[in-house]
Image: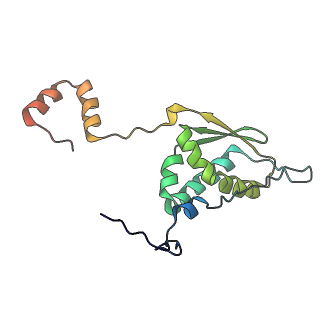
Amino acid sequence: MVIQKAEKPLVQKKEKSKFNIEDALKVEVKKETKSITLPHKDEPQNHFTDTDLQTEWNLFLEDLKTSNSLVYNAINSFKLNKIDEHGIEVCCPSEMAKSEFNTVSAQFFNHFKHKVNNFHIAVSYKMDTKLKKEILTKRKIFDKFAEINPVLNDLNDLMKFDFT
């Protein structure tokens, strides 16, 4: 058996396919930088009340309910409190909810600073697990009532209630 060899290579030029993994991995990473302007002495720092804060927070939540319901559901249990002349404390139930709040916090605080004409507001965060809302299912409601009145468990055994 004799193996024949070609005189020149069969493939002349290597053509790139439409999709190249190497090119896909070389995607440029765009860095986004945010410039933070520090408050100056000549910026206004008018007084605002806790009522002003609560009113604007509730208006913001109502607007957010229609525009972005996912973020609304994550942050609607937050409590905002005025702690001193230029300080606001944001009480949030978890780190995940705080990260969702960070997506819209600049929008809210920018609007609030212009509304009350105070640009020296400082924001602090506090974790408060008491703010977590428990979703009550029909089963949980029944179990609460069964704790109060144990006869309901016997009734459930007899009637085979469907709590789905």
Q: Position of residue 128 (x, y in %)?
A: 56, 32
Res. 78 visible in picture:
no
Q: Is residue 2 above or below residue 150?
A: below
Q: Is residue 157 above or below residue 80?
A: above
At 13% across and 33% down in the image, what residue appears? 156
Closer-to-camera residue (154/67): 67
Q: Quadrant of residue 63?
A: bottom right
Can you name the residue that lies furthest to the left here? 158
Q: Position of residue 6 (x, y in %)?
A: 44, 72
Res. 111 visible in picture:
yes
Closer-to-camera residue (65/98): 98
Horizontal placement of 106 versus 43: left or right?
left
Locate the N terminus and report the quarter of the image it occupies: bottom left
Closer-to-camera residue (12/75): 12
At 24% across and 34% down in the image, what residue appears? 142
How is colour applied across the structure in the image?
A: rainbow
Locate the C terminus and report the quarter of the image it occupies: top left
Q: Is residue 7 above or below residue 49?
A: below
Q: How many numbered badges does the structure rendering display?
A: 0
Q: Position of residue 85 (x, y in %)?
A: 79, 40
Q: Position of residue 41 (x, y in %)?
A: 92, 49
At 85% across and 50% down in the image, what residue appears? 39
Can you name the residue that lies furthest to the front here? 1
Q: Quadrant of residue 86?
A: top right
Can you name the residue that lies furthest to the right here? 42
At 40% across and 38% down in the image, what residue appears? 134
Horizontal placement of 102 versus 139: left or right?
right
Horizontal placement of 107 versus 39: left or right?
left
